[in-house]
Amino acid sequence: MAFLKNAWYAGAWSHEVGRALLARTILGEPVLMYRTQKGQPVALSNRCAHRFAPLDRGRLVDDAVECPYHGLRYDSRGQCVHNPQGDGVIPKGARVRCYPAVEKYRVVWIWTGAPEKADIAKIPDFGFIDDSERYGITTGTILIKANYELLSDNLLDLTHTQFLHADVFKSEAVMRGRFEVIENGTTIHSNRWCPDAPPTPPLRLALNYEKHVDFWMNMRWDPPGLMRFDVGATPTGKPREDGVHNLEMHLLTPETETSTHYFWADARTYGINDPVVEENNRRALEHAFVGQDKPMLEAQQAMMGTADLWSLNPVMLQGDAAALRARRVLARLIGQERL
Ligand code: FES
Ligand SMILES: [Fe+2]
């Protein structure tokens, strides 16, 4: 297995990155994050070039990080700018890798490929995250001991909600609704349209409506694992504006081959400033993501060991169509990087 290098990955939430040194393993590499005095996010290798000490155990001196072991200092571009030893000459090659880092949608994004190819316009649109007038927003981070493609399989095949999340999200309508998969360049859409059906309990509560609704679950996937989910309901036959919906951001960043930093955000159109709705919403989402998805994903990974999915000859179901395409797109892009 290999990772896609020329891509943006969520490194951290904006609020996690400050003047304290933050260490996080991304794509198997130790990464250090902090902010300059002017507020710019910085992402460097966390491994000192001298004897490979973890730099996050050091300290910031202005915008440079000082290694805790023998005191080399690196500036925010990873260049060694201070050597307290001997004659103080900066040894040739005394630098650590610097990752392009940008801030958008409340996230510090890290580019793990060739720096000259980093283009902020390549981050897919999650504009709703910045619209706190219109949405009540909840965010969270979960470390899951499973490969990130198992997470995208999970999110692109929402039939699992009828079994794994049956206590909260069950509705027969999900299984008999119309399912379509659209491939547009490297973007995959997995859409379910469930007209004239009983709503799932959370949608019933949000809509405060007992009768049948039209509801939709639309997932958009972009490589390497950046997903936008639109789930909503409206009284049957009414325009969508009469209903409610949640927009979600699901960002999957491999920590290693078999573990994933999962950043999620949920933006709801109802109870925007209501702390009780906020709390109930958070509890329901964490119940599903942490209480149900996480243990299942980790158990799947344990069952698979380090084997690649395809080497185990998995059976395919109709609901896998989108996940299959996403896996193909990713494999193609990774293959192209190897040429
Ligand atoms: S290990 Fe960092 S200065 Fe020696
Ligand atoms: Fe789930």
Image (cartoon, rainbow, N blue to C red):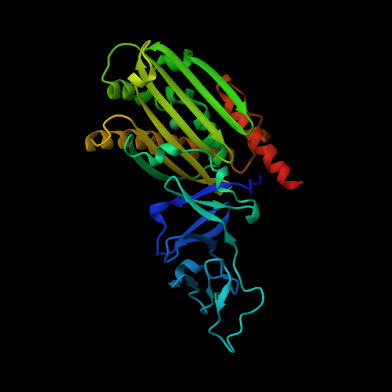
**Residue 201, placed above or below residue 27:** above
Residue 51 lies, in percent from the top left, at 59, 73
What is the quadrant of residue 333 in the picture? top right
Q: Position of residue 65 (x, y in %)?
A: 48, 71
For the N terminus, the quadrant is top right
Image quarter of residue 28: bottom right
Is residue 141 in view from this perspective? yes
Above-or-below relation of 40 to 132: below
Residue at 33%, 35% (x, y): give it.
Answer: 135
Residue drawn at x 51%, y 77% as measured from the top left: 69
Residue at 26% from the left image edge and 31% from the top image edge? 271
The residue most toward the bottom is: 87
Q: Is residue 294 visible?
A: no
Using residue 68 as the reference point, say whether residue 336 is left or right of it: right
The number of numbered discs placed on residues in the rendered structure image is 0
> Which is nearer the eye, 230 or 282?
230
In the rendered image, residue 300, in percent from the top left (x then y), is placed at 53, 36
In the drawing, does residue 134 fall left or right of residue 119? left
Q: Position of residue 296 (x, y in %)?
A: 47, 35
Taking the image in four quarters, ligand 1 sits in the one at: bottom right
